Image (cartoon, rainbow, N blue to C red):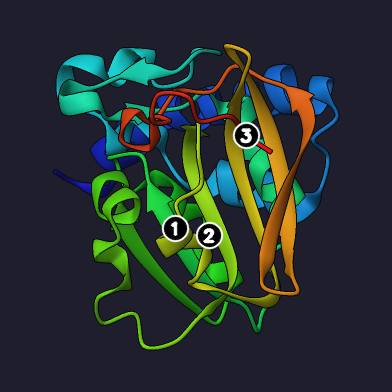
């Protein structure tokens, strides 16, 4: 493929990303330049199977096999704003199955580790973790935060995730203070649910 063909091939994608920024993010209050720059730079279709590339920029989540997903652009925009990643952050990403969120975040932080939802939910993420993280971000909505995952967050560290409350998904964030993580919902938002974090029967979010 020559340079001209490559340019023509990427032109529709660049146009779609610009439209995503203008029509989905800015109109919903996501205006932070670091967020817009990363979401403009990373082609969403690169993280989808070829047969789903045409729907990469719709304003809804794209479901994939085995419970994976690429969430709606607005979720990632709001998540990055809430996370406010810093250059010295050591970050753990619970991935939704595509690698898109880790790719968005990696240039913004000092160190990033990505784990699957299944590993994060069962405690396997703790194996070889090598310490704690100043920021944990979860690519999806959870019903419960396992103690094994909360233990990986450093004291005063931040966590940003989707949260299922009374069958409604909400963006939520919190800090670890006195060894406890307290998540507070910030707004209702359409977020794919991570079934690996389903609550046990009789469990309620405190």
Q: Give left or right: position of 103 versus 87.
A: left
Residue in the image at 62% along x and 34% along y: 205
Residues at discs 2 and 3 in contact (Cβ within 8 Å): no
Q: Give the total of numbered labels.
A: 3
Which element type, helix, strand or loop, lies under badge 3? loop
Q: Compared with residue 133, is residue 139 higher up or lower down, i.e. above or below?
A: above
Is the N terminus in the top left, top right, bottom left or bottom right quadrant?
top left
Pick the residue in front: 3 or 87: 87
> Which residue is under mark 3?
205
Which tag is nearer the camera, tag 2 or tag 3? Answer: 3
Q: Give left or right: position of 50 versus 94.
A: left
Residue 56 is drawn in which quadrant? top left
Q: Give left or right: position of 117 versus 19.
A: left
Residue 84 is drawn in which quadrant? bottom right
Q: Compared with residue 159, is residue 127 higher up or lower down, i.e. above or below?
A: below
Pick the residue in front: 156 or 98: 156
Which element type, helix, strand or loop, lies under badge 1? strand
Which element type, helix, strand or loop, lies under badge 2? helix
Where in the figure is residue 189, as x and y percent of width and height? 67, 20
Q: Which mark is residue 105?
A: 2
Residues at discs 3 and 1 in contact (Cβ within 8 Å): no
The Cα atoms of the two marked residues, 2 and 1, are separated by 9 Å
Residues at discs 2 and 1 in contact (Cβ within 8 Å): yes
Where in the figure is residue 139, as x and y percent of width and height? 47, 41
Few, some or many residues within 10 Å of mark 2 (<14, 14–19, 20+): many
Which of pointers 2 and 1 lies earlier in the amino acid sequence?
Answer: 1
The Cα atoms of the two marked residues, 2 and 3, are separated by 28 Å
State whether residue 103 appears in this view.
no
Pick the residue in front: 140 or 88: 140
> Which residue is under mark 1?
93
Where in the figure is residue 49, as x and y percent of width and height? 18, 27
């Amino acid at each position: 493929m020559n340079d001209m063909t490559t340019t023509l091939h990427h032109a529709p994608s660049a146009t779609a990303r610009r439209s995503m920024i203008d029509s989905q993010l800015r109109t919903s209050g996501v205006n932070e330049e670091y967020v817009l720059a990363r979401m403009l730079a990373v082609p969403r279709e690169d993280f989808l199977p070829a047969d789903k590339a045409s729907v990469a920029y719709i304003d809804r989540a794209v479901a994939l096999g085995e419970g994976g997903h690429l969430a709606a652009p607005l979720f990632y925009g709001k998540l990055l704003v809430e996370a406010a990643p810093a250059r010295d952050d050591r970050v753990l990403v619970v991935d939704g199955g595509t690698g898109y969120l880790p790719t968005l975040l990696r240039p913004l932080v000092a160190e990033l580790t990505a784990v699957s939802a299944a590993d994060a939910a069962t405690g396997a993420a703790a194996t070889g973790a090598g310490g704690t993280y100043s920021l944990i971000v979860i690519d999806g909505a959870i019903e419960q935060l396992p103690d094994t995952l909360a233990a990986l967050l450093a004291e005063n560290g931040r966590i940003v995730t989707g949260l299922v409350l009374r069958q409604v998904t909400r963006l939520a964030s919190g800090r670890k203070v006195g060894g406890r993580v307290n998540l507070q919902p910030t707004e209702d938002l359409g977020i794919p649910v991570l079934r690996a974090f389903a609550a046990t029967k009789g469990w309620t979010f405190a």
